[in-house]
Amino acid sequence: MTTLTQDIKDKLSRLNILEKIIVVNLIIYVVGFLLRKLANIENSLYWLELPKDAFDALLKPWSIITYGFTHYDFWHIFFNMLILYFVARLFLNLFNTKLALNVYFLGIIFGALTFLLVYNIVPDGVLKPATALVGASAGVRAVLIFLCAYMPNTEVKIFTFNVKLKHIGIFLVVIDILGLFSENQGGHIAHLGGVLLGYLYATQLHKGNDIGKGFERFMDRIASIFKPSSKPSPLRTVHKRKKSEQFAGHNKKEFDEFNKQKQIDLILDKISKSGYESLTQSEKEFLFREGKN
């Protein structure tokens, strides 16, 4: 039993952050399924769903995130997690973990806000009836559309065909626009919120603006609350503070980060023009190393 537990822990530790999100989604789906089948609770994940009414949503503030981990239908979770699995490898080969989390969770949040905005502003009778919002689609769309917008001419293999990312992105947007006339109108509204976030994030990052930095700092503060605080040493050594060395008006750390980002941008531009296989071994290793940071 100990060996099995250790084996599971080892396998989980080797998963990237988006694959861990897939595992969490699957666990919650299984729990909801068992509650429905064994305890006969129809809305078994009710407390995780995002209500369409703004006042009800205020009473469940956590649901703006947790709805993105909630699935009832097998095919719904299957396709969401399948797409996220394949996108995760490509994304994290090129970008770091924090950027992946920023895009994914901001996509979830933006999808929720778009859903709430539309259903609480558009008069009754114009939209099809909707209950609550569930599913990871807005976050998955955000990550995928981010890649499509950031390097649109990069080709990926689908079955035996090479398809440019921009064509995949256009196809998905068309599907979601057509979906506005379907029974799952609310879901497609949220999808388009995720699409918009992914597109804006990518286009702004191209200009050197990381629009997720504020969210990233907020999440870092939340994470720091749960980190065990180390006891201060009883002996304290006082050092005279040295004036930090400046590089073109920035400290060394900022200057190094700027240079790293420029190298990443140049490599991504090369991928966009000539494909991933055109990279040298050192360029691939550099991207892999930076993706782990």
Image (cartoon, helix red, strand yellow):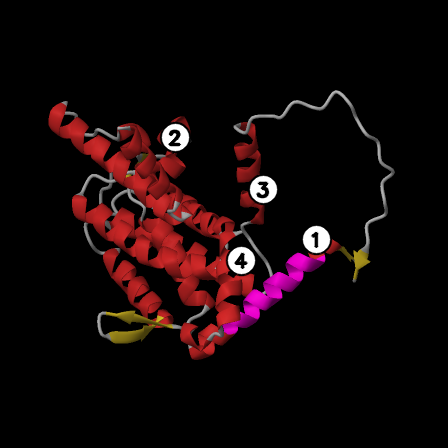
Estimate how packed mark 3 is, as few (under 14), some (14 to 19) or many (20 or more) residues with alpha carbons within 10 Å. few
Q: Quadrant of residue 29?
A: top left
In the rendered structure, the answer to whether residue 178 lies left or right of residue 226 reads: left
Q: Magenta part of the protein: which range?
A: 255-269
Mark carried by residue 58: none
Q: Hey, what amino acid is under mark 3?
A: Arg
Query: Taking the image as drawn, is residue 152 in sight?
Result: yes
Dot 1 lies on which element? helix
The residue identified by callout 4 is 290
Residue assigned mark 3 = 217
Which residue is the site of mark 1? 253
Relative image position of residue 100 (x, y in whole percent): 45, 52
Q: Position of residue 120 (x, y in %)?
A: 36, 40
Secondary structure beneath dot 2 equals: helix
Residue with the mark numbered 2: 55
User: What kind of residue is marked 1?
Assistant: Lys
Nearer-N-terminus badge (4/1): 1
Q: Residue shown at 56%/32% (left/top)?
A: 224
The Cα–Cα distance between marks 2 and 1, rounded to whole angstroms, is 45 Å
Q: Nearer the viewer, residue 242 or 192?
A: 242
The tag earlier along the polypeptide, 1 or 3, is 3
Q: Could you tell me what secondary structure mostly forms the magenta stretch?
A: helix
Q: CA distance from mark 4 to mark 2?
A: 43 Å
Return the residue found at the far front: 3
**N-terminal of the two: label 4 or label 3?**
3
